[in-house]
Image (cartoon, rainbow, N blue to C red):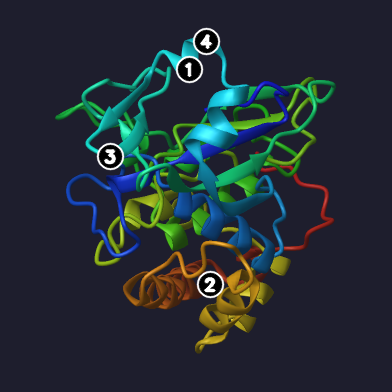
């Protein structure tokens, strides 16, 4: 739900999910989750990537804070369910039969800071994107040498973008996000700018599901930034959980992750470390570890 200024986005979920709710089904199933955006923002900072937009939790009053500044299009989607104010918004997946509802007038949500329009973004298809079609596999899902083909394709044949993709796979595996079918960078960057971690709301759905296929860029390419590896190594043995607790404890909607999700983060981190170690065992440290400032040519 976009506010008129165009520089912020308010994401409200209301009654759809509590922080303990487990989303069943495919790893990309379920509605977008506001608490996932907040947690992902803080995890991005802890990992040292700093590629996710600033997000903060907030309680909003739909009647006094949202309706007075809403567009006519958005206002037309407001409705009541019993004593609760609801809306379903205007988007591809928005349905009147599936509204987000407040508790009476107050709803828990998150606010995201958008970049100004003077910094336009360019959307790219993720090379490890899913088909989202039953019985139809993407090439990376059956071709273990797929990374070799990616390395011959701009902007992944040189420069930092392939390493950004691998960082993103690590990030997405930790948060359980299997929905990264596209990604954004700054426009007209010729492959030089960072990959921007927008739209992390399909995360933290099922703490019991560790979707290993999210790590395909890592285990198929078997390279990783030295700085990323050092950070992951530092965050082992409970440090990640402690750091996330400290980073999020002052957010207005804290706590927004269940203990099961925090345990899943620790477990998945061990899985990532194990995957990198397998790559090192197979190819050697000099091949797997890539210095951050190295001039890359992957071909």
Label disc, if present, on residue 280 of the rendered structure: 2
Quote the CA–CA distance across marks 2 and 4: 57 Å
Residue 135 place in picture, x, y as percent: 14, 29
Residue corresponding to mark 3: 83
Q: Nearer the viewer, mark 3 or mark 4?
A: 3
State the image quarter where residue 242 is shown. bottom right
State the image quarter where residue 226 is shown. bottom right
Q: Residues within 10 Å of mark 2 (few under 14, many from 20)?
A: some
Q: Earlier in the sequence, mark 3 or mark 4?
A: 4
Q: Earlier in the sequence, mark 2 or mark 4?
A: 4
Label disc, if present, on residue 72 of the rendered structure: 4
Quote the CA–CA distance across marks 3 and 4: 23 Å
Quote the CA–CA distance across marks 4 and 1: 5 Å
Quote the CA–CA distance across marks 2 and 3: 59 Å
Report the residue at 45% width, 51% height from top: 220
Q: Nearer the viewer, mark 2 or mark 4?
A: 4
Q: Element type at marker 4?
A: helix
Q: Element type at marker 1?
A: helix
Q: Earlier in the sequence, mark 1 or mark 3?
A: 1
Residue 98 place in picture, x, y as percent: 25, 29
Residue 68 place in picture, x, y as percent: 60, 24
Of 219 and 33, the residue lying toward us: 33
Q: Is residue 126 above or below residue 5?
A: below
Residue 40 place in picture, x, y as percent: 54, 56
Q: Is residue 213 visible?
A: yes
Quote the CA–CA distance across marks 1 and 3: 20 Å
Residue corresponding to mark 1: 74
Q: Element type at marker 2?
A: helix
């Amino acid at each position: 739900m976009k506010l008129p200024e165009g520089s912020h986005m308010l994401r409200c979920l209301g009654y759809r999910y509590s922080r303990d709710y487990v989303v069943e089904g495919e790893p990309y199933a379920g509605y977008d989750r506001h608490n996932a955006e907040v947690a992902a923002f803080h995890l991005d900072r802890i990992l040292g990537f700093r590629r996710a937009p600033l997000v903060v939790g907030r309680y909003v009053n739909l009647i006094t804070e949202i309706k007075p500044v809403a567009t006519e299009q958005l206002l037309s989607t407001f409705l009541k369910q019993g004593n609760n104010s609801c809306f379903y918004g205007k988007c591809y997946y928005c349905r009147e039969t599936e509204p987000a509802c407040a508790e009476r007038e107050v709803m828990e949500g998150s606010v995201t800071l958008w970049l100004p329009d003077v910094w336009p973004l360019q959307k790219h298809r993720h090379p490890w994107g899913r088909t989202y079609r039953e019985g139809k596999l993407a090439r990376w899902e059956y071709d273990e040498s797929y990374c070799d083909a990616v390395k011959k394709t701009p902007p992944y044949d040189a420069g930092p973008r392939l390493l950004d993709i691998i960082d993103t796979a690590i990030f997405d595996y930790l948060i359980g996000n299997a929905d990264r079918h596209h990604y954004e960078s700054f426009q007209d960057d010729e492959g030089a700018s960072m990959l921007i971690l927008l739209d992390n709301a399909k995360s933290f759905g099922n703490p019991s599901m560790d979707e290993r296929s999210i790590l395909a860029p890592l285990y198929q390419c078997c390279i990783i930034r030295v700085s990323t590896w050092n950070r992951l190594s530092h965050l082992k043995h409970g440090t990640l959980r402690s750091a996330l607790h400290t980073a999020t404890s002052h957010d207005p909607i804290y706590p927004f992750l269940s203990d099961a999700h925090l345990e899943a983060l620790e477990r998945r981190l061990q899985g990532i470390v194990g995957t990198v170690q397998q790559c090192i065992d197979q190819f050697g440290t000099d091949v797997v570890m890539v210095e951050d400032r190295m001039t890359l040519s992957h071909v």
